[in-house]
Amino acid sequence: IVLTQSPGTLSLSPGERATLSCRASQSVRRTYLAWYQQKPGQAPRLLIYGASSRATGIPDRFSGSGSGTDFSLTISRLEPEDFALYYCQHYDSSPITFGQGTRLEIK
Amino acid sequence: QLLESGGGLVQPGGSLRLSCAASGFTFSTYAMTWVRQAPGKGLEWVSAVSASGESTYYADSVKGRFTISRDNSNNTLYLQLNHLRADDTALYFCAKSPLGVDYGWFDPWGQGTLVTVSS
């Protein structure tokens, strides 16, 4: 399964709403999709699993949705610490794949 | 907590063994995985192993060259890297899978160990 994320770069201001897209080349069964945030020099951090379940400790401004081939991550009101790289990942079957990433940058 | 080690500089065609020491959870009940990230690039899943170690999974790019294993008595995950190529140069992360599945989502991740393949 190939995951294509869009846009490649998203330029927004703090307080704005961000919507990141992840499209799969074939249907992802049972919403087996996760989202991660990665900041420079750090390991990725799990945000969302099961397409819409927030991981422990993740603020409720982060939400995930979608099914089948189209998924999205929404950050309702951007905080300065949210500007980072974001990756989607499917775990439908092996081989597991990640999207190429969306860079969320400060406008 | 996950702590990787074993990275370094190796010549093309060479070998390396990476380790991931786990603590703070019952290691033997969770599948584990390796993910790598080439400099300035995205994430690439490499390999996974079931909780018991009986089932293993590999990306096509490393199949036949890399071997994943685990020692549940010592809470350690391994990745044996053979026939290394320049495009294997990356930061290698280990990560824990959720309970009851062989891969799933990954949480937490270690900080990574850097493998550089160069002559």
Image (tube, coloured by chain):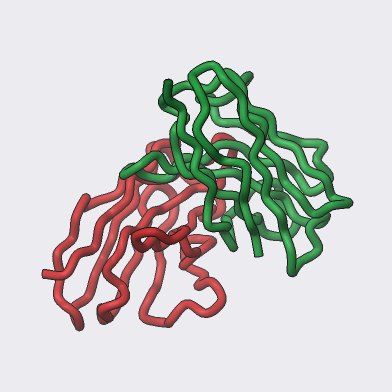
Please state the horizontal and vertical placement of residue A19, each as a whole percent of the image: 26, 65
Please state the horizontal and vertical placement of residue B52, each as a whole percent of the image: 84, 45
Check the rendered structure and report the hue given to chain B. green
Q: Residue at x 50, y 22 (%)?
A: B11
Q: Residue at x 44, y 49 (%)?
A: A68
Q: Quadrant of the N terminus of chain B?
A: bottom right
Left or right, A54 with reference to B38: right
Check the rendered structure and report the hue given to chain A. red
* Pick the front one: A102 or B25: B25
Left or right, B115 with reference to A99: right
- Residue B7 figure quarter: top right
Left or right, B78 with reference to B7: right
A30, above or below B67, in the image: below
Q: Would residue A35 be visible to someone looking at this image?
A: yes
* Pick the front one: A53 or A35: A35
- Residue A75 figure quarter: bottom left
Please state the horizontal and vertical placement of residue A91, each as a whole percent of the image: 55, 47
